[in-house]
Image (tube, rainbow, N blue to C red):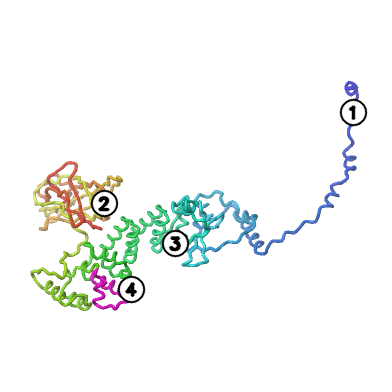
Amino acid sequence: MADNLLRQPVEAVLAKAAKPVEEVVAQTTNPVEEVLAQTPEPVELVLPQEVEVELQGAQANASSDSDTFSCASDTSSDTETSPKTTPSSSVPPTFDIIQHKDWQLNKSLAECMGYLLSTERFTDVAFIFPAEDPDVRLPAHKVILAARSPYMEALFFGRLATTKNEVEIPGYSYQAFHDFIKFLYTDDIKLTEENASELLRISHEYGAPQLTTECVRYLSAHLTADNVLDVLHTADLLGLRELELQSLLYVDKEATNVLRTADFPDLPSDVVSRILRRDTLNTTEIWVYLAAVEWAKAECFRNNLEQSGPNKREALKAFFSHIRLTNLTTTEVADVVAKDELLTQPEMIDLLLYLAASEKPQIDSFPIREERHFPKRVSVCQRYNEESTTLKPLEEEFTLTVNSDCALMGLILCKFLTDRKDELAMFDGGLTVINHCTDDVISVPFILTADSKDDHTQDVQLEKPIILEKDKEYQMILSGRAVLTSDRALNGLSSFSVSMGKFPNMSVQMGSFNITLTQSGKRSSRTPLVGLLVVMP
């Protein structure tokens, strides 16, 4: 049969093929027109009015610029207060997709994280602030917070993790906590004098050491008479020794202004005691006395007591001895102290007799203390004498340790003397301090000008204090060279001389504070270093 098919013409085979297309279509039971005619009428979808309005607005924004979005951390002004959010209503998935279209594209990680925070997408926890406003909520994401803070990790995913979707934040403002959460999301923070102290406390409590470091650095550089007491109190509570020392250093330097601030009477008694007992307050004793009296008045008010002399004296009982009454003048005692009635009559007589006497008698009423001096002078040489010397370029090394944190403010050097009248001379020097624990190196230049005065030493104040930490070993290198105004090196000119100290002390003890200073490297029995200028804790 196959052979028969092959023998037939092609036209005959095609004639016997299937029916034409027109005949097939004609026999179809449901033509296309009939199917379309049987399609039901379209149903109109009616949305709630508020959703329809929002959907139209979102579609318009998406069509106008679908590739652009701004993270809240970038668009908001630095000074603008972040809006306080309330629970957001649910919206249809379609609207959510349109509203947040392409929000991840061409954005940094910080931008995307900031967008999630500002838009509240996928949030699963909210912080509330009942003391400030019970209706205010700050939505966030547990996993992002846990990734940035060990405190948050323990709070949400630890063995005793909370099962609540709302976390109460006591003691902190909404705005400061919002800034903290924003930092966890974006690493971005705008520190100001208004928020830095509160953010320091928040970051320390909730485990964000990077932000704590930023706050410490900012506050150390922006201390003022108005904020230093609050910073000092905060640093003391949190155990931040570097910030505490920087605050005490500022208190010492600007003591008169600090003691006169309106915040001083509100300080805790232990902070007041710590300030009043300092040897390095840069002020006269009358300002110390007046500040103590103002604090005593406020303490009487806090305890509903009459502001009488005996009550004020009782309020000051814990640190009354820190007031160095023997360093007041007779006029100050007669015009000020006598009117406050803090002293008994025998005490007043003893004090006035002591101040009036040319040879000061011993008195039992008050401790006799030296005047306060900023900074503290610490002698490290047993003796020094003037001798002619060839003043060649100098480089001496010392090993330095302290038993308590302190600030090195300067050096006491043997005076550079000259009998030449035609040209001035100076010692162009530098101090380098190396922390062997951290390998940090601090170099500070200084100029020592020659003169012909009778005193043998000269103070060299450093432009920036060097913080020395407890029980850490420092290498101190003192270097320099003598030059004329014509900038010619004094290589061996005998007309110049210098007082050289002998045999540096191994250790200097001042109360509980101890400095150990020894020569290292090439040892010499002579040194121009006489002492150190320090501020102690």
- Residues rendered magenta in the picture: 288-317
Residue 130 versus residue 480 in the image, above or below: below
Q: Is residue 284 visible?
A: no
Element on which disc 2 rests: loop
Name the residue carrying label 2.
470
Query: Which element type, helix, strand or loop, lies under badge 1?
Result: helix
Q: Is residue 297 left or right of residue 390?
A: right
Amino acid carrying mark 1 in the image: Val
Camera-side mark, 2 or 1: 2
> Which amino acid is tagged 4?
Arg
Mark 2: few/some/many CA within 10 Å (<14, 14-19, 20+): few
Mark 2 residue type: Lys
Point out residue 95 in the picture as x, y percentages from the top left corner: 64, 56
Q: Secondary structure at mark 3?
A: helix
Return the disc, 2 or 1, that comes first in the chain's sequence: 1
Residue situated in front as seen by the camera: 344 or 68? 344
Q: Say which residue label 4 marks.
A: 302
Cα distance between the residues tagged 3 and 2: 34 Å
Task: Work out whether mark 1 precedes mark 4 in sequence or the reverse, and give the earlier one.
Answer: 1
Front of the two marks 1 and 4: 4
* CA–CA distance in space, label 3 to label 1: 91 Å
Q: Earlier in the sequence, mark 4 or mark 3?
A: 3
> Which of 512 and 73 lies nearest the eye of the viewer?
512
User: Which residue carries the number 1 mark?
Assistant: 13
Q: Given this view, does label 3 or label 2 mark the residue nearer the observer?
A: 2
Circle 3: residue type: Ala
Q: Is residue 415 magenta?
A: no
Task: Find the residue positioned furthest to the front.
Answer: 160
Q: Are marks 1 and 4 in contact (CB under 8 Å)?
A: no
**Alpha-carbon distance for marks 2 and 1?**
110 Å
x then y, percent, for residue 50 = 65, 64
| Residue 176 - label | 3
